[in-house]
C-alpha cells in the first residue's frame, strides 16, 4: 500500500475507535489522540525502512521492509509508549505506535514471517526485488486489492479535512492535532 491507504485507513480506524471510546464515556482517552501523530505513525515504518533498505542498503538488500516492519519494533514502540504515557503523562509515542501498528496490519506483515518475526528466522532480511517497486505501481492501476484501499484511504482523508474546514477546526488540528475544541486562530489586528 501507499500513502493514501496507510494514512487514510489509519485515520478511519482511529476515528472509529474515538467514537467507540466516547460512547462508552471514556473521553479522557479520546483527549490523548493527536491525529498528526496518527498520520506520522502510520507512515513511520516506510519513512525509515524504504530509504534504509531500498536506497542505502539497496545494492545488498534492496528490501524496503526491514527493521520497522518487525513485531520487535512494534512492541518496542508500544511498550515505550505505554511507559511514557503512564509514567510521564506523555501519550505521543503511544499514539504514534498505534499508527505504526496499523501500518503493519495493512501491509499484512504476517504473510512475511522472515521479516515480521525477525530475528526468529535469522539476523538477515529477505532480499528484495528491485522490479517489485515497478510492479507495485502497475498493480496500483490494475489490481483492486491495491487501488481500492488507496481510493478508500483518499476518500477518508478528503472527508476528514473537509469536516475540519466546515467546522472551522483546521487551525486547532494544525496546532494541537485535535479535531475539535478550543484553539482558535489569533485575531488579525484591525487596521
Image (tube, helix red, strand yellow):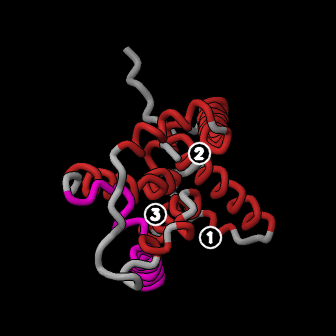
Viewer-nearest residue: 65 or 83: 65
The C terminus: image quadrant: top left
Q: Residue at x 59, y 45 (%)?
A: 8
Q: Earlier in the sequence, mark 1 or mark 2?
A: 2
Q: Residue at x 59, y 35 (%)?
A: 161
Label 2 packing within 10 angstroms: few (<14), some (14-19), many (20+)? many
Q: Residue furthest top?
A: 191
Residues rendered magenta in the picture: 60-89
- 191 to 141, vertically: above or below: above
Disc nearest the viewer among 2 and 3: 2
* Residue that label 1 marks: 29
Viewer-nearest residue: 31 or 61: 61
Find numbered disc 1 in the image and state the secondary structure of the residue it sits on.
helix
In the picture, the disc for residue 118 is: none
Q: Earlier in the sequence, mark 2 or mark 3?
A: 2
Q: Residue 125, located in which quarter of the rendered image?
A: bottom left
Q: Earlier in the sequence, mark 3 or mark 1?
A: 1
Q: CA distance from mark 1 to mark 2?
A: 21 Å
Counting from the top left corner in percent of width and height, residue 111 is at 56, 67
Disc nearest the viewer among 3 and 1: 3
Find numbered disc 2 in the image and state the secondary structure of the residue it sits on.
helix
Q: Residue 48, located in which quarter of the rendered image?
A: bottom left
Q: Residue 155, located in which quarter of the rendered image?
A: top right
Q: CA distance from mark 3 to mark 1?
A: 15 Å
Label 3 packing within 10 angstroms: few (<14), some (14-19), many (20+)? many
* Residue that label 2 marks: 8
Disc nearest the viewer among 1 and 2: 2
Q: In the rendered image, is residue 90 in sight?
A: no
Q: Residue at x 35, y 56 (%)?
A: 128
Counting from the top left corner in percent of width and height, residue 95 is at 50, 65
In the picture, the disc for residue 96 is: 3
Amino acid at each position: 500500500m501507499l500513502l493514501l491507504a496507510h494514512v487514510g485507513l489509519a485515520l478511519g480506524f482511529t476515528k472509529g475507535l474515538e467514537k467507540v471510546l466516547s460512547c462508552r464515556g471514556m473521553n479522557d482517552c479520546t483527549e490523548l489522540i493527536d491525529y498528526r501523530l496518527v498520520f506520522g505513525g502510520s507512515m513511520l515504518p516506510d519513512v525509515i525502512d524504504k530509504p534504509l533498505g531500498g536506497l542505502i542498503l539497496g545494492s545488498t538488500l534492496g528490501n524496503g521492509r526491514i527493521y520497522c516492519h518487525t513485531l520487535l519494533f512494534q512492541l518496542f514502540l508500544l511498550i515505550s509508549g505505554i511507559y511514557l504515557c503512564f509514567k510521564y503523562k506523555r501519550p505521543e509515542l503511544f499514539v504514534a505506535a498505534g499508527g505504526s501498528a496499523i501500518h503493519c496490519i495493512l501491509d499484512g506483515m504476517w504473510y512475511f514471517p522472515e521479516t515480521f518475526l525477525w530475528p526468529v528466522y535469522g539476523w538477515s532480511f529477505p532480499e528484495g526485488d528491485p522490479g517489485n517497486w515497478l510492479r507495485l505501481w502497475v498493480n496500483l492501476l490494475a489490481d483492486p486489492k491495491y487501488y481500492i484501499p488507496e481510493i478508500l484511504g483518499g476518500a477518508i482523508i478528503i472527508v476528514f479535512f473537509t469536516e475540519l474546514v466546515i467546522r472551522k477546526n483546521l487551525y486547532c488540528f494544525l496546532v494541537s492535532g485535535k479535531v475539535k475544541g478550543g484553539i482558535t486562530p489569533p485575531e488579525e489586528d484591525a487596521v
